[in-house]
Amino acid sequence: MKEPNSPDSPLADLCRQRGLKLTGQRRTIAFVLSDSDDHPDVEELYRRAVEVDPRISIATVYRTVRLFEENGILQRRDFGGGRARYEVADGDHGDHYHLIDADTGKVIEFENTELDSLLEGIVRQMGYDLVTTRLSVVGRTKAKTRSRG
Amino acid sequence: MKEPNSPDSPLADLCRQRGLKLTGQRRTIAFVLSDSDDHPDVEELYRRAVEVDPRISIATVYRTVRLFEENGILQRRDFGGGRARYEVADGDHGDHYHLIDADTGKVIEFENTELDSLLEGIVRQMGYDLVTTRLSVVGRTKAKTRSRG
DNA sequence: ATTGCAAATGATAATCTTTCTCATTATCAC
DNA sequence: GTGATAATGAGAAAGATTATCATTTGCAAT
Ligand SMILES: [Mn+2]
Ligand SMILES: [Mn+2]
Ligand SMILES: [Zn+2]
Ligand SMILES: [Zn+2]
């Protein structure tokens, strides 16, 4: 019986560094995540993982994203669609915010240091240390022809 | 049979203004909401409503918050606890943001016009009109004695 | 390479929040 | 007050996530 091995990936290495047991399923999910540059939910991750290795269950995908999130490898996002979405907590990708197109649902990332420090300052002034910022803005394209699309 | 009538409230008036049928249950829920200055979830609203009028079901609370939200009377909030929370969309209360205490879960409201216009500007510069801002920050009190609390 | 054991997996049940169904009841314009 | 219409209550159903448990696997020590 041939075992479909996924190639190693940056996330698989991270897995080892954290002392997590590197199973075939985790290698596959790590590979899929490293290969993604969007914000898939668990169902979508499951679809992509099955392409690479059919011996995987959605329960394991749920377990693995939770594990990865607890270990700082993944970030969970809530764009309000009922299901959580995930992206790699990448050091060089950097912290960023999300603009969601109200009509298409498309997610556009942006960074803004002025926003970073403004939020820092507001929270500090209220006597707190900033732990997490949960921010997404919904917008509609200005010059969009509406009403007969 | 005596029918426990809730007093009218600002929200009950809004109900009428929008042409919504003003049932006893809606009057009760409107009263409870007008009486609240926090961010209750549906279960909590249900508890408060039953105090006023036991002839109410949680299904109706769910239906009513949805109706009120669709009519701009309520705002739905997501503070990440799994259930939606609600507060009155009050004109004079004004738009505001939320700081959540990481240790206690307490929700602290704040306004900041600089943040308002910065977000406006960022979104406009990306070619969009700002529709909704979903922002909450999690913070931890600076001078809190941790680790043996 | 084999063994052994703790940990992970797959399949599915359970949980949790929210919505839906449908028979009954209440609102409101007349 | 009557009647058409919409709202309600109770519970089923849906959708997302977590828990259960028998089986399999990774991996450290032999
Ligand atoms: Mn949510
Ligand atoms: Mn079910
Ligand atoms: Zn992102
Ligand atoms: Zn508020």
Image (cartoon, coloured by chain):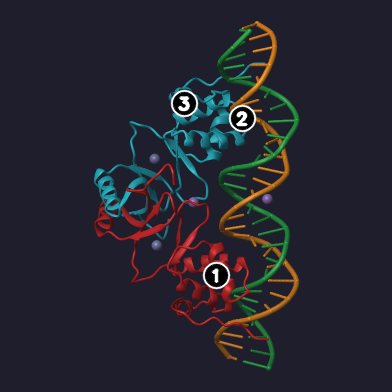
Chain colours: A cyan, B red, C orange, D green
**Three-letter code for the amino acid on which mark 2 is drawn:** Ile
Assign a secondary structure to mark 2: loop
Residue situated in front as seen by the camera: A84 or A103:
A84
Return the residue at label 2.
A56
Label 3, on which residue? Answer: A18
Disc 1 and disc 3: Cα gap in Å?
47 Å
Is residue B125 in view?
Answer: no
Please identify the quarter of the rendering in which residue A126 is found.
bottom left
As shown in the figure, which amino acid type bears the numbered disc 3? Arg
Q: Is residue A31 above or below residue A3?
A: below
- Residue at x-position 48% and y-position 42%: A85
Q: Which residue is mark 1?
A: B48
What element does badge 3 sit on? loop
Q: Does B40 sit above or below residue C13?
A: below
- Does label 2 lie on the same chain as label 3? yes
| Mark closer to the observer (3, 2) | 3
* Residue D25 falls left or right of residue A26: right
Indicate the quadrant containing the N terminus of chain B: top left, top right, bottom left or bottom right.
Answer: bottom right
Q: Nearer the viewer, residue B121 or C8?
A: C8
Ligand 4 quadrant assignment: bottom left
